[in-house]
């Protein structure tokens, strides 16, 4: 059975991922690779909004960032004997197996069209979560398997994406040296997930999401939005590349875009919000299953809110999420500040603008 008979979650998903009490989600085979469940509409909205506001296309920056981190991620997936086998016996079957990984993460379905070892790979991706991002992901996988630098091109054809990667004479290891990621220290938490007795994944996973790994799609039941699993390292690499290329204002721009989105989503529900300390903590509790971090305390004083989130996946997005809640609750604009999470936590301060 591809799906757990009890909770309906794909067995490959729960066997390859672990949910931690600290509010984080990891690859089981490599705990240094942290994952996060993201609203795909929110991710694309951020990327599209950045391009609109700065007036510059960002697709090539996305491809470059994703293939850097994508190769690093695939090196972890192909670690040990599995990686040795894949690289020594590289064939179209290897890439088709990697396509199952893409579908399991909700990134879309991929099919190999043509392949020649150490030379080229052509494929079709249906329902790609983001054209530029998945082009970078697959190019990174190609570089990891072939140990060759890849030149990638793609074009959309209706609901599908045709992708072509050609190996160059460059050594891909030189390219890898330009990628670096230092995860912050982990702060222990006390989150306890009720586990499915069959697959041992969190029960809330099946309660919260619908999975269709044949179509490469995951949808949140409550909103109907598409969601995806992506590496925190790849996400930070993507936004870091945008900041490096476009300027230091990008993190605050990302925060503002997310704040506006969250405020709109909450306002559309038309419900009264509990803006007490307990209300903020309940709101932050939704981040734990997604691997976004662990909201541990909130303080309210004189109209100012201070919240601490341990192990944040990306500080500007955490700050934007809280800022959107604040604006929806108060009906006014928020001034939002946050601290760097390199110590293992971030403190977000919200006050009326």
Image (cartoon, grey):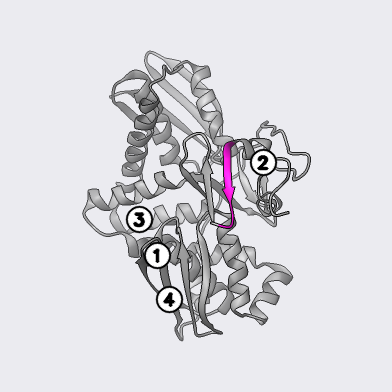
- For label 1, the residue is 63
- Name which residue lies at 48% across and 73% down: 123
Q: Residue 20 carries which label?
A: 2
What is the C-alpha distance between the residues marked 2 and 4? 38 Å
- Report crowding for label 4: few under 14, some 14 to 19, many 20 or more residues within 10 A (C-alpha): many
**N-term mark: 2 or 4:** 2
The answer to whether residue 176 shows anywhere in this view is: yes
- For label 4, the residue is 164
Q: How many labels does the image show?
A: 4
- Name which residue lies at 56% across and 72% down: 144
| Residue at far left of view | 55
Secondary element at image label 1: helix
Comparing 175 with 2, the one in front is 2
- Name which residue lies at 35% across and 47% down: 46
- For label 3, the residue is 242
**N-term mark: 2 or 3:** 2
What is the C-alpha distance between the residues marked 1 and 2? 30 Å
**N-term mark: 3 or 1:** 1
**N-term mark: 1 or 2:** 2
Secondary element at image label 3: helix
What is the C-alpha distance between the residues marked 2 and 3? 30 Å
Residue 111, how many percent across, how many down? Answer: 53, 70
Contact check, label 3 and label 1, Cβ < 8 Å: no
Q: Is residue 324 left or right of residue 207?
A: left
- Name which residue lies at 58% across and 57% down: 214
What is the C-alpha distance between the residues marked 3 and 4? 24 Å
Identify the magenta region.
208-214
Secondary element at image label 2: loop
Secondary element at image label 4: strand
The answer to whether residue 230 shows anywhere in this view is: no
Residue 79: name its quadrant. Answer: bottom right
């Amino acid at each position: 059975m591809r799906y757990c008979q009890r909770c309906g979650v794909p067995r490959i998903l729960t066997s390859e991922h672990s949910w931690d009490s600290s509010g984080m989600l990891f690859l089981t085979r490599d705990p240094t690779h942290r994952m996060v469940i993201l609203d795909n509409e929110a991710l694309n909205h951020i990327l599209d909004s950045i391009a609109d506001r700065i007036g510059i296309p960002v697709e090539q920056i996305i491809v470059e960032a994703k293939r850097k981190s994508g190769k690093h991620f695939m090196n972890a997936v192909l670690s040990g004997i599995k990686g040795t086998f894949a690289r020594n016996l590289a064939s179209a079957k290897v890439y088709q197996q990697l396509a199952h990984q893409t579908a399991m993460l909700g990134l879309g379905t991929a099919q190999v069209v043509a392949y020649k070892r150490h030379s080229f790979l052509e494929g079709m991706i249906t329902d790609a979560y983001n054209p530029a991002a998945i082009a970078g992901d697959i190019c990174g996988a190609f570089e990891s398997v072939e140990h060759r630098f890849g030149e990638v091109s793609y074009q959309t054809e209706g609901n599908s994406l045709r992708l072509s990667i050609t190996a160059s004479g460059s050594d891909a290891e030189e390219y890898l040296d330009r990628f670096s990621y230092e995860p912050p220290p982990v702060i222990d938490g006390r989150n306890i997930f009720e586990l499915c007795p069959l697959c041992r994944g969190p029960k809330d996973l099946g309660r919260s999401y619908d999975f269709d790994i044949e179509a490469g799609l995951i949808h949140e039941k409550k909103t109907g939005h598409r969601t995806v699993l992506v590496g925190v390292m790849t996400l930070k690499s993507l936004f870091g590349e945008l900041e490096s290329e476009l300027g230091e204002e990008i993190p605050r721009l990302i925060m503002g875009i997310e704040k506006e989105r969250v405020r709109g989503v909450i306002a559309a529900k038309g419900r009264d919000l509990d803006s007490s300390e307990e209300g903020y903590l309940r709101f932050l509790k939704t981040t734990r299953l997604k691997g976004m971090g662990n909201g541990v305390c909130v303080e309210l004083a004189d109209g100012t809110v201070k919240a601490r989130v341990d192990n944040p996946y990306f500080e500007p997005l955490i700050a934007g999420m809280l800022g959107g809640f604040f604006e929806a609750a108060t009906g006014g604009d928020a001034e939002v500040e946050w601290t760097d999470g390199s110590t293992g936590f971030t403190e977000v301060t919200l006050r009326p603008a």
